[in-house]
Amino acid sequence: MSGPPNTTKTVSRRRFLKVGVAGSAALALGGALAWQTRGYEVPAAVSSRLRALSPKEYLIAKAVAARVLRRDADDLPMPEELHVAEYIDGMVARLDEANRTDLKRLLHVLEHVLPWSAAKPSRFTRLDGAGKDAVLASMMSSSVGLLRGAFEALKSLCVMAYFRDARTWGAIGYDGPLLNRPVEGWARLRVRERR
Amino acid sequence: MSGGFRRGREIQQDVAATADVVICGSGAGGSMAARELARSGLSVMVLEEGGDHTARDFTQREDEMIPALFQEMGGRRTEDLSVMILSGKGLGGSTVHNTNLCKRTAPEILTQWREDHGLRGISEQSMSPFFQRVEQDLGVVPIDPIRLNGNNQILKAGAEHLRYRGGMLSHNRDERCIGSGFCELGCAYDGKLNARRVLLPQAVEAGAIVYSDARVVRVLHDDGEARGVEGVLTDANGRSRAGIRIHTRTVCLAGSAIGSASIALRSGIHDPHSQIGKSLRIHPGAIISGVFDRVVESFRGIPQSYECTEFLDLSKGSNKRVWIIPSFAHPIGSSALTPGFGPALMRQMRNYPRTAVLAGMIHDETEGRVYLDGERTRIDYVPNAQDREQLALGARESARIFLAAGAREVMIPAVPPMYVRRESDLSQITAARFAPNDAKLTAVHPMGTLRMGADPHSSVVDERGRHHHLSGLYVVDGSLFPTSIGGPPQMSIYAFAMKVSGHVVQDMRARS
Ligand SMILES: Cc1cc2nc3c(=O)[nH]c(=O)nc-3n(C[C@H](O)[C@H](O)[C@H](O)COP(=O)(O)OP(=O)(O)OC[C@H]3O[C@@H](n4cnc5c(N)ncnc54)[C@H](O)[C@@H]3O)c2cc1C
Ligand code: SF4
C-alpha cells in the first residue's frame, strides 16, 4: 500500500540535465562562440592520455577534486600527487554511455551555470578556493534534491580516486588489504560452528 | 549435453544454439534454477551479463572490486539520485559480494502473500522443505558469538543495555572464512558458500552451459509463446563484441528485480495491466555512525553477525518495520557516506578506526517502479510518508543504541548532518529529515517488479512463477516477491527458485 503522494520537490535526472544543458547553451549564445574551449589548455602529455573527458572537462573535474579532497593536515597527500583527475577520467571511460554523457553534462553545468545560482558569476574553474567552496556547498545543501544528489555523485568519484591510494590510509588508521601480509591474531579465528 | 563455463569476452563470433531452458542471470535465483533444472535432465543454458570472478580475482581493494562486481560500477541510483541501489553483476550475482546472512521468509509475510495475493499454496509449512534443502546445500549455521567484531559488539552491548530484542544471526560461510572483513568485495579465501562456489559448479556438473559476459537483450516470442532469447557477448567493460541467440521454449528470468523487469519491458511482452516493473521494494536504509573514544576497527572480522529486532514486527499494518544491523564500509564507501567535503571530511575520516556504523533498514511499503527510457533502465523510488517515519525511527533508535554503548558522538548523514551527543538530541530525528536527497539512503535488496499473484490485474506471474500471458516464461529471482520481506532475501530467493524450478519441470513434461 502506498502512502499519500510525496510533496517534496523532485526533479527527474533527465529534466535537470536538460535544464542544465539549455542553460549552457544560453551562455554559449550570449558569449563568444569559442567560450567552450578557450582557456582550458592542458599539457599535451596529459591530454593525450585522456580517455573520456575533454581537456575542459578534465580541468573542471580537477578543480572539483582539489576542493572536495582538500586536506586538513599535511600527513594526507594532495589530490594532485595522486593524479586524482586522471583516475576520474579512467572511471568515466568505463561508465556506460548514458551515465558517461550525464556526468560530462554535469561538469559543464557546474562550470557555467551553478556559480551563478551561488551568486558567483564566473566560471567555476576561475573562482578562487573560497568561491569554489561556496558553489560546492550551495550544491550540497541545495533545496533542489537532484542537485544534492549530483553533488554526492561527484564527491563519490573524488573519494574513490583518493582513498584508493595506500598513501591516504595511514592517516585514517586503515591498514589496507589483508592479502600479501601475515594474517594477524584477530583474523586467525576460523568458523568453529558445528555443522 | 556436457556442461561448462564459457567466457563471452573470449568468444569472437556470433553464437546460435538450442536449449530446453535458458536462464537470464546467474545470481541467487538463476543459479538455483540452473542446478535444479540441469539435474532434472534438461539442457540448460545460463546467460550472465557480468564476468566470472572467483577467489583469486578478489584483491580486497574497493577501487577494483566495486566497479567489477556491482551494477553500473556501484553507482546505480534512483532517477532523482536520492537512493543508492547496490546489486551484483557477474556469475553468482549479488551472492558473491553479499554478507551471507541467512533467514527464512517470515511466516507473517507468507501469510500475507496467501491472504492478500491469492497465493493459496504458500505457507510456512509448504515452504519448509525448500528452506531445509537450501540451508543444507549452502551450509547455513548460526554464527558463533566468538566472531562478533567491534561493530557488532557495540550493537549487542547497546541493545542489551536498553533491553532491546536482538540476537546472533545465521550465515553461509565455512571454515575457509578467516574473518578478514572484506565480504562486500568478494572473498579472497573462498569462505562463502554462495551461488558461484556451490550451485553453478553443480549445475555445470549436471550439464548446464554457463556463459559469463553474455547480456540478454530480449526474450523472443511469438503467438503468446516464448521462442528464445537474444543478446550480446561483451568485453570486460560490457561493450558488445558478438551476438548470441538461443532457441528455446522455456525462459527463466533471473536478472534480479531491476534486470529482469528491464528484460521483460524490452521484450514487448503482453502486459495488459501495466504490471511489469511495478511494486519495486528495496529495503532502504539510513546509515548512522557512532564515534567512540576507543578503537573499534569495524573493518575487521565478519561484518554482520548480530541483529536488533526490537522495532521489527512483520505482521500486516505494523508500525514497527525496522531491522537494525551493523553496516560498516571500507574507506571509499565510508568517505562517500560521510557528510561534507574538504578539511571537514578529512577530519571525520580520521575517526575511521573509532567508528561503528548501523543501518536501520526498513520493511518498505513504498512501491517504486522500474521502466525504460529508450534503451536505458530507470528507477523511481520515493519513500512515502509512513516509510519516512520508519526511516526516522530506525535512525533514532540506532542513535540511542550507540549512546547506550558509550558513543562520544552519533552522526546521521543528511543535509545538514544530524549530530547526537545526548538523549535530548534524538528529537531532531524526524520523518521530515528523510525527504529525498536529504538523509543518505542505501538499498541492497531490490525485490518485486514481476510479482506473483493470483490476479493478472495486479501481478505478473502466478504462484508457479509462470507468466500470466506468455507461455514458457518464468521468473525465478527476487522479482517474484509480492511485497517486501523485511529481512535478508537470499534464502527466500533460493527457496522460491527451487520451488519454481519444480513447476517448470512439471510443465515441460506435461507439454511434451
Ligand atoms: C552489499 C550487499 C550485501 C548483501 N547482503 C545480504 C545478506 O547478508 N543476506 C541476504 O540474504 N542478502 C544479502 N544481499 C542481497 C542478496 O544478495 C540479493 O537479494 C540476492 O542475491 C538477489 O538474488 P537475485 O537472483 O534476485 O539477483 P542477483 O543475485 O542480483 O543476480 C542477478 C544477476 O543477473 C544478472 N543480470 C541482470 N540483467 C541481466 C541481463 N540482461 N542479461 C544477463 N544477466 C543479467 C546480473 O548481472 C546478476 O549477476 C546483499 C546485497 C548486497 C548488494
Ligand atoms: S569475512 Fe570471511 S567470508 Fe567475508 S571476505 Fe573475509 S574470509 Fe571471506
Image (cartoon, grey):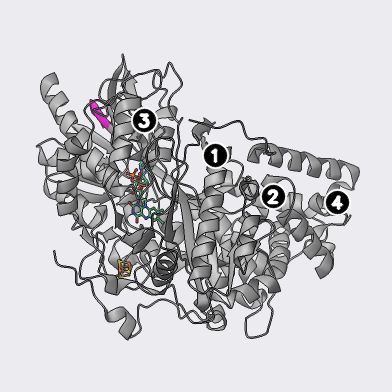
Q: Position of residue B49 (x, y in %)?
A: 37, 45
Neighbor class of circle 3 (other Cα within 10 Å; few <14, some 14-19, many 20+) is many
Name the residue carrying label 1. Answer: B386
Residue A124: image quadrant is: bottom right
Residue found farthest to the front: B163
**Numbered disc in front, either 2 or 1:** 1
Between the C-alphas of marks 1 and 4, the distance is 37 Å
Mark identifier at residue A116: 4
Neighbor class of circle 2 (other Cα within 10 Å; few <14, some 14-19, many 20+) is many
Per the image, label 2 sits on a secondary structure element best described as helix
Per the image, label 3 sits on a secondary structure element best described as loop
Is residue B445 depicted above or below B328 in this figure? above
Between the C-alphas of marks 3 and 4, the distance is 47 Å
Name the residue carrying label 3. Answer: B451
* Host chain of mark 4: A
Q: Position of residue B119 (x, y in %)?
A: 28, 26
Magenta residues span B247-251
**Numbered disc in front, either 3 or 2:** 3
The three-letter amino acid code for the residue at tag 3 is Arg
The three-letter amino acid code for the residue at tag 1 is Gln
The three-letter amino acid code for the residue at tag 4 is Trp
* Host chain of mark 1: B
Between the C-alphas of marks 1 and 3, the distance is 22 Å
The three-letter amino acid code for the residue at tag 2 is Leu
Q: Position of residue A172 (x, y in %)?
A: 55, 79
Name the residue carrying label 2. Answer: A106
